Image (cartoon, rainbow, N blue to C red):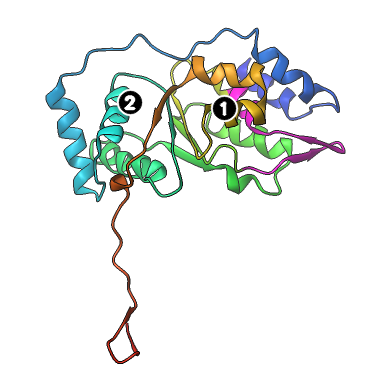
């Protein structure tokens, strides 16, 4: 039954996509589980494992980790360079070490040149997986039957049906920017589906040593 639903999405007509965002306002939200209490020492242990992977754990990131471990779908926002994506990369390292399947990442920049059929195939392929939709707001508009349409509302609707799998997102956009881009009927769903955490401190980003250094005489040392 669910597989047929996905196949039907791949055959969207010219005006079907425009109606999709409107349906979001009436689809029940199945997402957030009842938050569970996690001992502080457990969160601290996982935080320590992420630090050993190279992550510099600031207070904002620690709050995000605590929400993640309590069962929330995370919406991590913040300026470029604060370590939003790297947070999930280090979290995936921890998951692998525990024998847990990594969170599958889709950068919205990768949707350049996508069709709605590509979006449907990705949704079907990741149907039973936890996913991270990275850089929301950076994606291009898709050309669908001669009309410019947003791909994110489509992906969002497909993920809303997942009760057993979790969906996370990162974005450089704040709540007001999200509202402007996707309109209220879609943006309001973000608040219901995700727990938003803003990372402000750049201390959370990995330090990378430069591999080319300039010497005192003006030359370069590689």
Q: Please, which residue is most extreme toward the bottom here?
A: 217
Q: Which disc, if any, is residue 68?
A: 2
Residue 158, image x and y in percent? 60, 23
Residue at mark 1:
176
In the displayed structure image, the side of residue 176 where residue 95 appears, left or right: left
Q: Could you tell me how far apart the alpha carbons at marks 1 and 2 are, in whole angstroms? A: 23 Å
The answer to whether residue 63 is magenta is: no
User: Which residue is found at the position 39% from the left and 12% from the top?
Assistant: 33
Q: Please name the residue shown 25% across and 34% down the image.
A: 59
Q: Residue at x 30, y 33 (%)?
A: 60
**Mark 2 residue crowding within 10 angstroms, few (<14) / some (14–19) / many (20+):** some
Q: Quadrant of residue 137?
A: top right
Q: Position of residue 127 (x, y in %)?
A: 53, 27
Q: Quadrant of residue 57?
A: top left
Instruction: Kindly identify which numbered label has been placed on residue 133.
Output: none
Quarter of the image where one finds residue 34: top left
Image quarter (top left, top right, bottom left or bottom right) of the N terminus: top right
User: Looking at the picture, does residue 11 appear above or below residue 209?
Assistant: above
Task: Answer few, some or many: residues within 10 Å of disc 1's Cα (few below 14, many 20 plus, some between 14 and 19).
Answer: few
Residue at the left extreme of this rendering? 41
Q: Earlier in the sequence, mark 1 or mark 2?
A: 2
Residue 157 belongs to the span the image colors magenta: yes
- Give the secondary structure at mark 2: helix
Nearer the camera: disc 1 or disc 2: 1
The answer to whether the residue labelled 1 contacts the one labelled 2, judged by CB atoms less than 8 Å apart, is: no
161 relative to 214 in the view: left or right = right
Q: Residue at x 19, y 41 (%)?
A: 49
Residue range highlighted in magenta: 139-158
Give the number of marks: 2
């Amino acid at each position: 039954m669910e597989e047929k639903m996905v196949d039907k999405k791949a055959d969207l007509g010219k005006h079907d996509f425009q109606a999709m965002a409107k349906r979001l306002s009436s689809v029940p939200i199945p997402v957030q589980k009842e938050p569970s209490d996690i001992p502080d020492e457990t969160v601290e242990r996982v935080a320590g494992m992420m630090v050993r992977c190279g992550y510099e754990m600031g207070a904002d990131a620690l709050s995000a980790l605590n929400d993640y471990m309590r069962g929330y779908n995370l919406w991590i926002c913040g300026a470029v360079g604060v370590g939003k994506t790297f947070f999930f990369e280090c979290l995936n390292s921890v998951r692998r070490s525990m024998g847990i399947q990594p969170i599958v990442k889709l950068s919205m920049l990768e949707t350049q040149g996508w069709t709605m059929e590509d979006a449907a195939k990705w949704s079907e392929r990741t149907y039973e997986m936890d996913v991270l939709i990275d850089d929301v707001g950076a994606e291009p508009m898709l050309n669908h039957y001669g009309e410019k349409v947003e791909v994110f509302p489509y992906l969002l609707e497909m993920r809303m049906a997942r009760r057993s799998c979790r969906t996370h997102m990162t974005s450089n956009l704040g709540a007001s920017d999200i509202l402007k881009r996707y309109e209220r009927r879609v943006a309001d769903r973000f608040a219901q589906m995700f727990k938003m955490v803003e990372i402000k401190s750049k201390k959370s980003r990995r330090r990378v040593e430069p591999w080319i250094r300039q010497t005192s005489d003006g030359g370069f040392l590689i």
